Image (tube, coloured by chain):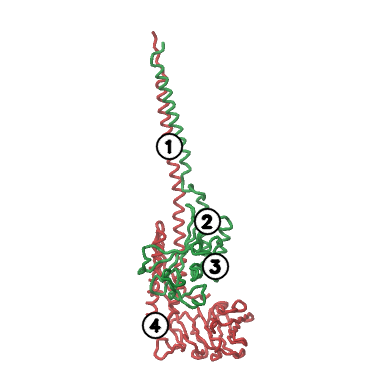
Chain colours: A red, B green
């Protein structure tokens, strides 16, 4: 009797073991590839989003700080430089608190904005806060040497402004490039305000109906705000000059009634009385402090990004 | 001569082979199903497209914020007190709805998203003053545009606008011309006609910091 060993016993068990090993290898390779693909897809997107958020924060705070300090500058007249510094510091601190709360509630980021008074630059704001003629400023150049104007607005009481076109109020601005801006304001036959402005051969004119008897003239941007303004209220302004301003004069100062204010880049830059001085009335032209450039520190801290920047925010434009 | 165990061995071989086959097939099936599980799947937008859409949404908000005639700040204040929604909007629940907001931002949203088949919601989120009854740690919100419930893979972009006490509504009525924001009624339930939803969040020149939130899907 012959008995034969069947070798297929071991082969069958080998096949089973081989199948288990193959299955294990397939699963392991799959896990490794999947993890690699997931990490590769996720990581850049997260850090790119945070960088964009930091950039957006920087842009928002620059604009927000500029608008805030501008409002504080023009909010009060009777205030000295140290009080202005304190007011700006308080305003920026308030803005910082609200901004931090807003970011904390919507995204995993901590932000802050801090005003640094010492490196900030201060200028002069010349203001006549109540209606009157413009005689207070006197004749001649209202700017000192190396002063430049960054903002200038006139709020005209149209009804009480002269209707003499030839002898109307005129302001003249000279720049360092040899150009001259000449702007005339007068009431026309229809009790509207006409503004004529020219720089060399280029000239514009607009006529606006008053709103509650008033028309606002942005002398810097060359924009007149009223009702139904012709030429869209646009005329030549200081920003259309090629050079920096170096001289500003008022002529026929008693032919206009209204309020005005302009800002220059030099502290104590006017010969007019200080607005906080004794005997200075609201309808007197006077000078007060203004923040020209605000130095702020902005910080953004996200999950993967930390950003801190010391920046000089220009409150007024000079180009 | 075949032993009495050859039948059971054959069955054992068969069972082992079947089990081995099942193991391999299961592993292959797992592998095929697992490869598709990445952050780029699970929705209808791949990562590159989502990135593009988010960049476009960011650009729309930044461009709208810099518009000279009707920027985001003006849009936030373009409020109709009597209808308790934005001026020209359909109703307080959907705001401008499918029509989109007015001005430059409406044009940008139409050209960038609506015309290409995307839906969007535009919402304002504002802070409550700390001493108010609404201060529960959450922000308030008011819809500018509501076009539906966003998909799970929707893209979100935000931009912040700062309101100041001495600003006025950009769509004033006779009763609100010259009325500064800090003077407006912001109580919706005091029974008086008309209100502005965004409150004065803090003493000082800053009125509120409003988050303009654009969700696109």
Instruction: Name the chain under label 4.
Output: A
Numbered mark located on residue B53 in the image: 2
Secondary structure state at the residue bearing disc 2: helix
Nearer to us of marks 4 and 3 is 3
Q: Identify the image quadrant of residue A276.
A: bottom left
Q: Are marks 1 and 2 on the same chain?
A: no
Instruction: Name the chain under label 3.
Output: B
Q: In the image, what residue occupies the spot 42% across and 21% down?
A: B11
Sequence-first tag of 1 and 4:
1
Name the residue carrying label 4. A80
Name the quarter where the N terminus of chain A is drawn: top left
Name the residue carrying label 3. B88
Of B105 and A140, the residue lying toward us: B105
Q: Is residue B119 above or below residue A79?
A: above
Residue located farthest toward the left when viewing the structure as drawn: B131
Q: Percent from the top left, x then y, of residue A249?
A: 54, 87
């Amino acid at each position: 009797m012959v008995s034969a060993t069947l070798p297929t016993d071991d082969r069958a068990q080998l096949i089973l073991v081989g199948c288990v090993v193959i299955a294990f290898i397939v699963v392991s390779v799959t896990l490794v590839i999947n993890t690699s693909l997931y990490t590769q897809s996720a990581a850049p997107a997260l850090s790119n989003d945070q960088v964009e958020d930091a950039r957006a924060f920087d842009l928002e705070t620059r604009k927000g700080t500029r608008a805030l300090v501008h409002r504080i500058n023009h909010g009060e007249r009777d205030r000295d430089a140290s009080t202005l510094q304190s007011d700006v510091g308080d305003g920026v601190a308030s803005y910082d608190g609200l901004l931090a709360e807003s970011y904390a509630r919507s995204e995993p980021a901590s932000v802050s904005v801090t005003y640094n008074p010492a490196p900030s630059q201060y200028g002069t704001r010349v203001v006549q806060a109540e209606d009157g003629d413009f005689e207070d400023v006197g004749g001649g150049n209202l700017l000192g040497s190396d002063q430049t104007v960054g903002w200038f607005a006139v709020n005209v009481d149209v009804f009480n402004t002269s209707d003499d076109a030839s002898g109307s109020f005129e302001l003249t601005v000279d720049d360092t490039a040899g150009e001259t801006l000449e702007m005339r304001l007068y009431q026309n036959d229809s009790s509207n305000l006409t503004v004529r402005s020219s720089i060399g051969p280029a000239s514009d004119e607009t006529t606006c109906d008053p709103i509650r008897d008033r028309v606002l003239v942005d002398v810097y941007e060359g924009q007149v705000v009223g009702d139904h303004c012709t030429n869209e209220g646009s005329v030549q302004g200081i920003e259309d000059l090629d050079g920096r301003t170096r001289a500003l004069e008022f002529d026929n100062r008693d032919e206009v009634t209204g309020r005005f204010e302009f800002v220059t880049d030099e502290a104590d830059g006017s010969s007019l009385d200080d607005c906080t001085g004794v005997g200075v009335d609201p309808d007197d032209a006077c000078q007060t402090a203004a923040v020209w450039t605000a130095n702020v520190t902005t910080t953004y801290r996200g999950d993967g990004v930390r950003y801190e920047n010391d920046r000089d925010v220009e409150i007024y434009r000079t180009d | 001569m075949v032993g009495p165990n050859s039948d059971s061995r054959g069955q054992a071989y068969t069972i082992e082979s079947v089990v081995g086959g099942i193991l391999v097939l299961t592993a292959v099936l797992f592998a095929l199903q697992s490869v598709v599980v990445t952050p780029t799947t699970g929705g209808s937008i791949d990562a590159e497209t989502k990135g593009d859409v988010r960049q476009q949404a960011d650009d729309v908000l930044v461009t709208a914020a810099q518009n000279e005639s009707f920027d985001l700040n003006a849009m936030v204040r373009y409020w109709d007190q009597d209808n308790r929604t934005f001026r020209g909007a359909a109703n307080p629940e959907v705001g401008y709805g499918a029509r989109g907001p007015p001005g430059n931002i409406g044009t940008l949203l139409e050209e960038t998203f609506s015309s290409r088949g995307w839906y969007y919601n535009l919402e304002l989120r504002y802070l409550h003053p700390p001493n108010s009854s609404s201060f529960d740690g959450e922000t308030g919100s008011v819809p500018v545009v509501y076009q539906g419930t966003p998909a799970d893979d929707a893209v979100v972009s935000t931009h912040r606008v700062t309101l100041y006490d001495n600003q006025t509504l950009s769509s004033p009525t006779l009763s609100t011309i010259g009325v500064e924001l800090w003077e407006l009624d912001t109580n919706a339930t005091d029974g008086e006609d008309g209100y502005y939803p965004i409150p004065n969040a803090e003493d000082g020149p800053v009125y509120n910091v409003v988050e303009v939130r654009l969700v696109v899907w």
